[in-house]
Image (tube, rainbow, N blue to C red):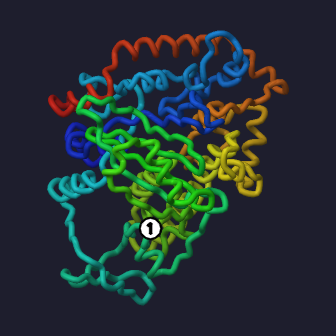
């Protein structure tokens, strides 16, 4: 997203001030393995030390049981330590969009929509028409010729991007492109969301998403500048709404009784085709999975990037571009489903059939089963994936696998453990980076307050 903001010519200072944005350095998964207190691991946004140069994961596994050896993400990445301390990924002296530790954002989507509209219309020459579509008009070749509106008559176009959300007005309803459900793999189908104010204006702001496993799903906890966004996503097959509300109330605390709770249905899956004729769907109109790992937001970014980079010069080549877009997007959705499912199949929780049924082999995609066979004997590597269109790199799979207690057996490949000197250098370097970052970085709250008051330096 930082790259997108830079490309649009947006000031990071303005963005943070106007969109209630905060810094996100990854995700903390609590109570996903066995559900006990102290059960957590991180999926940070910084690559492991020595990634791609040696089997550092193998050397970490071989060190298990030694005094002072911590979790995988703690030993190979300094970001877990700074997140646990509530520290920011940079200082006020760091230039806009630059970093000490890689980061993304948490933000108020409503404020961001207004902010983008203002920026694009005032500075990029975009014409914004706010109206209701009453009809979709088709050309002889079955393209969309125009859309009729209540107050602005017909709006013609060469390419229509369907951003109509779950209704999928153009691709789904007009073109009748079928929706492919994956509810047999990912069981989540409901969310209960609430906005929780901080206790006071100096309350800490977590610099990561907190995902806490529950009986029939998990709770997200996202810290913005002035409030937290909290939500329980669960499967209605394994929990009633009354039970889910009780779980959410237990997590949020007594003040939840005065807060409005929004119920959101979730239908996991995606359209069988994403670009048909001169219509391409982006966002919820293309598909949606549960909000784990912010995969839906990632897909919006990737789709927008691909459309902008490969925008057809004429209608004559649009079908070629559409074919490539569809193939790439299909691949990405399938890999995301594998990655999300990975979080569930490694859990040992037995407190609800939700968790045990998630480990049923019949619910696990064959592509993920094949990968798990490979990783039984070595850590995930970039060459395990056949495309350059990966959404999550092999490093992300390493963080989840070893964070949840998976152990690759290197007894059949001892040669991968020969680089002890290099591995020890990486572990030591990570320890030094933890100390350096801990001494230098402000808290997330402190930095955001300074951004609001002073702003960052320009790039």
**Residue 251 picture quarter:** top left
- Up-down relation of residue 306 to residue 319 (above or below): above
Residue 459 visible in image: no
- Up-down relation of residue 38 to residue 249 (above or below): above
Residue 350 shown left or right of residue 457 in the figure: right
Residue 165 visible in image: yes
Q: How many marks?
A: 1
x and y, in percent, of residue 290 in the image: 52, 54
- Up-down relation of residue 185 to residue 34 (above or below): below
Where's the C terminus, which quadrant?
top left
Secondary structure of the residue carrying tag 1 is helix
Task: State the residue position of label 1.
Answer: 285
Q: Nearer the viewer, residue 24 or 29?
A: 29
Q: Residue at x 70, y 15 (%)?
A: 63
- Up-down relation of residue 149 to residue 456 (above or below): below
x and y, in percent, of residue 12 in the image: 25, 38
Where's the N terminus, which quadrant?
top left
Residue 1 shown left or right of residue 30 in the figure: left
Residue 213 shown left or right of residue 174 in the figure: right
**Residue 350 picture quarter:** top right
Q: Residue at x 27, y 51 (%)?
A: 112
């Amino acid at each position: 997203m930082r790259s997108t903001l830079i490309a649009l010519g947006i000031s990071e200072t303005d963005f943070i001030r106007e969109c209630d944005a905060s810094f996100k350095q990854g995700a903390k998964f609590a109570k996903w393995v066995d559900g006990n207190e102290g059960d957590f691991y991180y999926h940070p946004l910084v690559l492991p030390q020595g990634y791609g140069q040696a089997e550092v994961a193998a050397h970490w596994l071989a060190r298990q049981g030694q005094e002072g050896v911590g979790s995988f993400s703690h030993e190979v990445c300094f970001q877990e330590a700074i997140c646990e301390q509530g520290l920011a990924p940079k200082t006020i002296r760091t230039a806009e969009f630059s970093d000490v530790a890689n980061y993304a954002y948490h933000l108020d989507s409503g404020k961001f929509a207004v902010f983008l509209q203002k920026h694009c219309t005032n500075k990029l020459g975009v014409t914004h028409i706010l109206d209701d579509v009453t009809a979709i008009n088709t050309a002889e070749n079955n393209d969309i010729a125009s859309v009729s509106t209540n107050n602005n008559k017909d709006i013609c176009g060469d390419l229509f991007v369907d951003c109509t959300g779950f209704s999928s007005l153009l691709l789904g309803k007009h073109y009748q492109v079928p929706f492919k459900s994956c509810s047999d793999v990912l069981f989540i189908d409901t969310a209960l969301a609430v906005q929780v104010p901080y206790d006071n204006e100096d309350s800490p702001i977590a610099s990561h998403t907190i995902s806490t496993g529950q009986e029939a799903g998990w709770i997200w906890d996202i810290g913005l500048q002035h409030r937290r966004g909290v939500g329980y996503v669960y499967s209605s097959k394994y929990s009633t709404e009354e039970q889910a509300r009780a779980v959410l109330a237990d997590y949020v605390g007594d003040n939840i009784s005065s807060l409005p709770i929004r119920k959101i249905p979730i239908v996991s899956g995606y359209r069988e085709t994403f670009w048909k004729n001169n219509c391409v769907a982006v966002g919820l109109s293309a598909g949606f999975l549960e909000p784990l790992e912010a995969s839906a937001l990632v897909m919006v970014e990737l789709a927008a990037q691909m459309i902008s980079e490969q925008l057809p010069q004429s209608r004559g080549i649009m079908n070629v571009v559409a074919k490539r877009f569809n193939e790439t997007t299909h691949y990405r959705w399938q890999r995301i489903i594998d990655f999300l499912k990975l979080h569930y199949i490694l859990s040992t929780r037995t407190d609800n059939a939700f968790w045990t049924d998630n480990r049923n082999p019949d619910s696990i995609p064959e592509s993920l089963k094949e990968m798990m066979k490979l990783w039984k004997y070595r850590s995930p590597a970039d060459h395990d994936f056949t495309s350059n269109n990966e959404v999550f790199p092999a490093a992300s799979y390493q963080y989840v696998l070893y964070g949840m207690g998976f152990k690759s057996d290197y007894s059949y490949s001892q040669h991968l453990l020969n680089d002890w000197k290099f591995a020890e250098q990486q572990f030591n370097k990570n320890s030094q980076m933890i100390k350096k970052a801990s001494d230098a970085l402000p808290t997330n709250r402190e930095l955001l307050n300074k951004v609001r008051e002073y702003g960052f330096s320009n790039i």
